[in-house]
Amino acid sequence: MSSPGSGKTTTLLRTLEALKDELRIGVMEADIDSDVDAKTIADAGVKSIQLHTGGMCHLDASMTEQGLKEIGTKDLDLVVLENVGNLVCPAEFDTGAVKNAMILSVPEGHDKPLKYPLIFTVCDAPIINKIDVLPYFDFDMEKVVEYAHMRNPKLKIFPLSAKTGEGVDAWCDWLREQVRDWNE
Ligand SMILES: Nc1nc2c(ncn2[C@@H]2O[C@H](COP(=O)(O)OP(=O)(O)OP(=O)(O)O)[C@@H](O)[C@H]2O)c(=O)[nH]1
Ligand SMILES: [Mg+2]
């Protein structure tokens, strides 16, 4: 989950690059319209489908269920669902996901956990993306961590750049751990 353009698809591409040789991964891309993101993922050689919400700003569990039937989970270790770009509605609906990650990108500002509390409360792992542009923004990394932990002290926070790859290893380690724990 994240705002439009904070880097869900780009982070996913980096993640797939790191994990696709060890895990069988499928991607379900949700958007109001178009199949741009599903094509981007398919071009990277990963199984993907596009879900359309028909104008709605979020996915719900029944749409996820339909998506899982379409993609077929028999030969997959991990299915990733990219929700519609929005910091509000996706947090209000349970997609049925085992774990939820969200992305806040540096240009959006460090105050977002104060202004959009629910998404930071319901997610397990916030990613702070676009750290390569930190020199150009008044983004306070200590404050964002403090504000996010006010919402949920258990959050594992991953600052990274999907563009340069910095910080992606720690995020992928966490994801690997989640898949291992789930399969045990
Ligand atoms: N500088 C920089 N740009 C990035 C980074 N990650 C993504 N971008 C750029 O941000 C823009 C949006 O990235 P996407 O990955 O399409 O974002 P998204 O969240 O999937 O967008 P929607 O699916 O439309 O909500 C693109 O121009 C990316 O190249 C990053 O770490 N650093
Ligand atoms: Mg996207």
Image: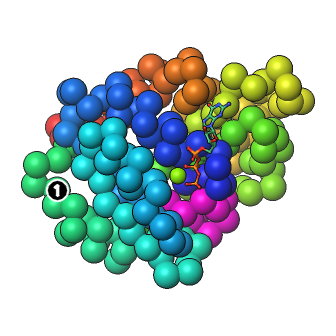
Where in the image, quadrant-wise, is ligand 1 located?
Answer: top right
Q: Residue at x 78, y 24 (%)?
A: 134
Q: Nearer the viewer, residue 120 or 30?
A: 30
Graded by Cα atoms within 10 Å as few (under 14), some (14 to 19) or many (20 or more), the crowding at tag 1 reads: some
Q: At which x and y percent is residue 140? A: 83, 28
Q: At which x and y percent is residue 180? A: 24, 33
Q: Residue at x 75, y 48 (%)?
A: 113
Q: At which x and y percent is residue 146? A: 76, 33
Residue 89 lies in the magenta stretch = yes
Write down the quadrant of residue 23 in the picture: top left
Q: Nearer the viewer, residue 8 or 44?
A: 44
Quarter of the rendering occupied by the C terminus: top left
Residue under circle 1?
73
Q: Residue at x 69, y 48 (%)?
A: 151
Q: Residue furthest right?
A: 138
Q: Main secondary structure of the magenta part?
A: loop
- Give the magenta-colored segment's residue range: 83-91
Residue 96 lies in the magenta stretch = no
**Residue 62 visible from this viewpoint:** yes
Q: Nearer the viewer, residue 73 or 55?
A: 55
Q: Residue furthest bottom?
A: 54
